[in-house]
Image (spheres, grey):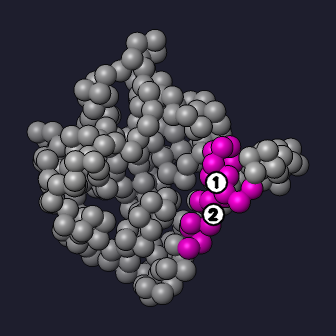
Amino acid sequence: MTAISDAELKTVSFDILLFVDEFCKQKGICYFLCGGTMLGAFRHKGFIPWDDDIDIMMPRADYDRFLCEFPAHDCYALDAPGLTPGYPFAYAKVVDKRTVKYQGAVRERFKNGYVDVDVFPIDNVPDSEEEQKRFFDSIKRIEDRRTFFLFPKREKGLKPLAARMVRAVLEWTGLMNIDKAVAAFCRLARKYESSGSGHWAITSIHHYGIKEVNTAADYFPVLEAEFEGRSFPVPSNYDTYLTRLYGDYMKMPPADRQKTHHLFDAYWR
């Protein structure tokens, strides 16, 4: 296999985004840049120089349509909970099948790693800040359960050998495994789907927790921002979104923090 350079990695990811953008526009599926990708759009008009991935988010109804209507393609495919056996995440990825990605412990438990674009559903969350905190505490606990099955060498409070024995027993008896842990995570993420609450957040990961919460009205009307010379959708109140996540988001971080947090090697098949 041939290694994919950093520059190629960005090109592969960006091409996936272009494909997703065209498909969503054709189908009328709403999505937004999110996280570091949205930050890169406003601070750098493209990738954060030391970053190498792309993240997008969709309201849950649009996300469900995206999963159902994603087309067959020679290069691109969809990995998602409930669709991909052994898939270890509670959100979807659009992947380039011409690539392979080796990502440490994730690769040990889930063999089909590719260069991808992360697709996060946006879910309703409680309107009360106190209830929001309790809900994200629950999200953290169930993410820890998923992590227990995904990362064999990251146990906290249990010796690695004992943790492996517990995990093996749970998997052998069928009481719990990565598929069941992710399914429970997905159910919890959708807990307030029919609540009609006025607040939304990404709940299928706990990276930012309650900082992800915004009012539903903050997302519309959809605006556009430049990313690598093209325009892509962002929430109307992008300033509030980015400030909640990053504080003074237009200020560059210190030099010692200008490094990627994604540790993997990527290759052409």
Is residue 20 or residue 9 the one in the foreground?
9
Name the side, left or right, on which 252 lies relative to 202. Answer: left
- At a point 17% along the width and 50% down the height, the residue shown is 41
Residue 146 numbered mark, or none? 1
Residue 139 inside the magenta-drawn segment: yes
Could you say which quadrant of the image residue 105 lies in? top right
Q: Amino acid at mark 1?
A: Arg
- Mark 1 nearby-residue class (10 Å; few <14, some 14–19, many ≥20): many
- At a point 32% along the width and 34% down the height, the residue shown is 13
Expressed as whole percent of the image width and height from the top left, the position of residue 93 reads 45, 42
Asked whether the beta carbons under mark 2 and mark 1 sit within 8 Å of each other, the answer is yes
Main secondary structure along the magenta-highlighted residues: helix
Expressed as whole percent of the image width and height from the top left, the position of residue 211 reads 37, 71
Q: Amino acid at mark 2?
A: Ile
- At a point 55% along the width and 53% down the height, the residue shown is 90
- At a point 37% along the width and 81% down the height, the residue shown is 198
Please say if 247 is above or below 121.
Answer: below
Q: How many marks?
A: 2
Please say if 268 is above or below 129.
Answer: above
Does residue 229 appear in the picture of this structure? Answer: yes
Residue 129 inside the magenta-drawn segment: no
Q: Which residue is mark 2?
A: 142
Does residue 94 appear in the picture of this structure? Answer: no
Q: What SS does tag 1 mark?
A: helix
Expressed as whole percent of the image width and height from the top left, the position of residue 179 reads 68, 48
Q: What SS does tag 2 mark?
A: helix
In this picture, which residue range is highlighted in magenta?
137-158
Expressed as whole percent of the image width and height from the top left, the position of residue 260 reads 34, 42
